[in-house]
Image (cartoon, rainbow, N blue to C red):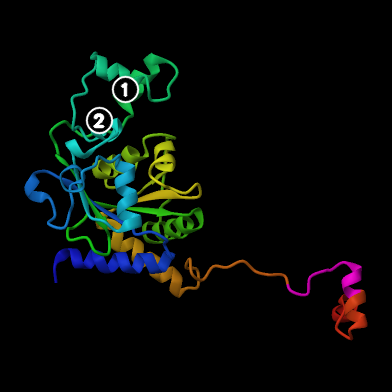
Amino acid sequence: MAEYDVYNKLGEELEKLLILRYAPIAVKLLKTEGDIPRSAQRPKRDLGMHLALCQAFAMVRRQRKSLALLKEDHWCVWPLIGFGLVPFEEGTDYHDLAVTANFIEDPDKARAFFKTSYPRLAPGSNIGLALAPLDTADFVPDFILVYLKPAQLRSALMSIKYKTGTLLEAQFDSVDSCVHSTIPVLKDGKYKITVPDPGEYERGLTDEDEMILSVPGDKLSDLVAGLRRLSDMGFGYRQLHMEMAVDFPRPQFYDDLFRMWGLDTGEIWKR
């Protein structure tokens, strides 16, 4: 059995436990072209198109494609900057143009934000990303992206707390979700929750009620084990349900009609 087969099986189980609508995305940072999985298609070379990274995520989770994105495949500036695939030195025109376009009013605060808080990898540290559905990926992922609804996220958070005994701490940005959901996980190996940004919504086909959970590859088995145990305890996502109030109070004419039909009325049923 190949090492990635273990992740494939965990991916299958994760989809079932959370009743996920879309495939979790296995992601691997590529150091050299020799790291590109054989199954991966290159958007520009093989498909004749460029993709924003959020669109690549959408193609993988919705259409179950396997992709590899290198510098020439991208159609959005932020992953190019975040993954260190292009020059981005302070004091240059392209640096100031990007910084001041990132929804921070004060230019000085914008520059400070990019210097201290914007997730970035070192230039030259990689050549791109490999992406594939988790249950069919032919590589061991560095991390996994799970697009889910808040109720599904709640169950995932229950699992994380159950296994770690701690709460997941989160910081949120309203933009650049392709960067915030990926690079911090690569750098610190921790779970991450990200709000899909406007590009994810407008071009990446992300629904308004979806969030992104980033799972470090070495924590996937714990996440699934926790979900499995919670399910066995009756607290899994599949087991939780709303409770209906039966024999509820009704308008008087309901009881009047039921009485005429010889059926139980609210007054009789309460005795």
Q: Is residue 254 magenta?
A: yes
Does residue 175 appear in this view? yes
Does residue 190 appear in this view? no
> Mark 1 or 2 closer to N-term?
2
Q: Is residue 124 magenta?
A: no
Name the magenta segment's main secondary structure: loop
246 to the left or right of 82: right
Of residues 65 and 163, which is closer to you in this image?
A: 65
Q: Position of residue 183 (x, y in %)?
A: 27, 40
Mark 1: give few (<14), some (14-19) or many (20+) Cα within 10 Å.
Answer: some
Residue 98, label in figure: 1
In what element is the residue under mark 1? helix
Residue found at the very far left of the displayed protein: 34
Residue found at the very far front of the displayed protein: 48
Q: Position of residue 111 (x, y in %)?
A: 33, 19
Q: Is residue 154 above or below residue 99?
A: below
Q: Position of residue 256 (x, y in %)?
A: 93, 75
Q: How many marks on residues?
A: 2
Residue shown at 39%/57% (left/top)? 160
Q: Which residues are magenta?
A: 246-255
Q: Quadrant of the N terminus?
A: bottom left
Q: Which residue is mark 2?
A: 81
Quarter of the figure with residue 30: top left
Q: Is residue 24 above or below residue 173?
A: below
Q: Position of residue 141 (x, y in %)?
A: 22, 55
Q: Quadrant of the C terminus?
A: bottom right
51 to the left or right of 197: left
Q: Is residue 25 above or below residue 15?
A: above
